Image (tube, helix red, strand yellow):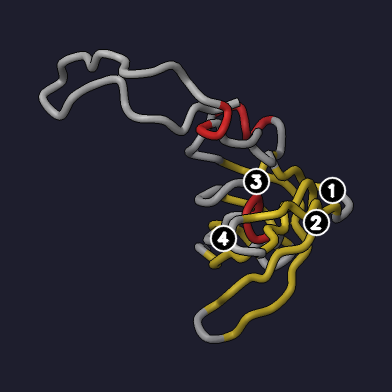
Amino acid sequence: MKDQGRSTRKRTGGRLKHASNKKRHQLGREPAETTVGETRVQYIDSRGNEKKVRALSTNVAQVADGDAVSEAEIENVVDNPSNVNYARRNIITKGAIIETSAGRARVSSRPGQTGQVNAVLID
């Protein structure tokens, strides 16, 4: 689990002394790590009686080319700047370059938060 607490360093770069131990309510959730495959989603309760749709895997992307938006099949992940191993494992995150049936596209949505992949053609 990821700790969502305060930073361990000051603005000047010095270390902060801990005022208290880590608490359970400060923990985040495990990342969704959306993969390329048959569409699977998970619904998560969120703050304010809302729900988050977490895409566990998907093979469809909404690809924008100027003003036109079309649905395209995701073939694989070409590059992922957030983690060098994500491209090898076909994990889709925001900013990832994906190969689609419409061409190469950059992911502009957060599939682990919204449950869908929106992308913009870059070719």
Quadrant showing the N terminus: top right
Of the numbered discs 2 and 4, the one sitting upstream in the chain is 2
Marks 2 and 1 in Cβ contact (< 8 Å): yes
**Depth check: 86 or 52 in front?**
52
- Asked whether the beta carbons under mark 3 and mark 4 sit within 8 Å of each other, the answer is no
Judging from the image, what secondary structure is the residue with disc 2 in? loop
* Cα–Cα gap, marks 2 and 1: 5 Å
Q: Do the residues labelled 4 and 1 touch (CB within 8 Å)?
A: no
Would you call the spot at circle 4 few (<14 residues within 10 Å), some (14-19), or many (20 or more)?
many
What residue does disc 1 label?
37
Which mark is first along the chain, 3 or 2? 2
Residue hosting label 4: 109
The amino acid on which the numbered mark 4 sits, given as a three-letter code, is Ser
Judging by the rendered image, the residue that carries numbered circle 2 is: 59
Amino acid at pointer 1: Gly
> How many neighbours does mark 2 have within 10 angstroms: few (below 14), some (14-19), or many (20 or more)?
some
Q: Could you tell me residue 3's position as x and y percent?
A: 49, 27
State which tag comes first along the sequence, 4 or 1. Answer: 1
Contact flag, marks 2 and 3 (Cβ < 8 Å): no
* Mark closer to the observer (2, 4): 4
**Amino acid type, label 3:** Ile
Between 3 and 20, the one lying in front of the other is: 20
Calculate the distance from the C-alpha at mark 4 to the C-alpha at mark 1.
18 Å
Q: Position of residue 67 (x, y in %)?
A: 52, 86
Q: How far apart are marks 3 and 1 (CA)?
A: 11 Å
